[in-house]
Image (cartoon, rainbow, N blue to C red):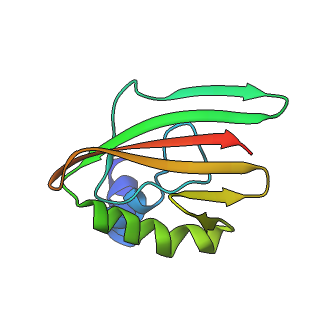
Amino acid sequence: MLPFALLIVATFGMGSARAQQFVPGTEDVPLMRDLAPVKDSDIVFDKPEGRIIEASARGKVTKSAVRSFYASTLPQLGWKASGESWTRETETLHLDFAGHDGDLWVTFTLVPK
């Protein structure tokens, strides 16, 4: 098994595996590479009106870098900027920041419109 695992890492690289990570509780909101999920921070509710998700991630990043990443990534996935939030079909995504540049917490809140 080990040679196969090494082949996967050699073929795809560690960055590719990391790039496929999503905000906890979602399968369609990418997690910025320099952010790591905060363990046990996600709350997920599925309701007839839509899903409600709140999850946090932390990293040695700046607010500006996070905003820039999502401003370039989310539109490719069908999200439209709406002030400090993003909307897509029947959902709204909001990013909240805590901490400071270099030790930043980002809370992702996804709710029905």
Q: x, y percentage for residue 50?
A: 77, 36
Q: x, y percentage for residue 97?
A: 33, 47
Q: Residue at 23%, 61% (x, y): give it.
A: 62
Q: Residue at 40%, 69% (x, y): give it.
A: 69
The answer to whether one can see residue 12 in this image is no
Q: Quadrant of the C terminus?
A: top right
Q: Nearer the viewer, residue 94 or 72?
A: 94
Looking at the image, the residue that sits furthest to the right is 48
Q: x, y percentage for residue 104?
A: 23, 48
Q: Is residue 105 above or below residue 62?
A: above
Left/right placement of residue 70 relative to residue 36 reads right
Left/right placement of residue 69 relative to residue 100 reads right
The answer to whether one can see residue 75 in this image is yes
Q: Nearer the viewer, residue 14 or 37?
A: 37
Q: Residue at 28%, 58% (x, y): give it.
A: 34
Q: x, y percentage for residue 76?
A: 61, 74
Q: Nearer the viewer, residue 75 or 83?
A: 83
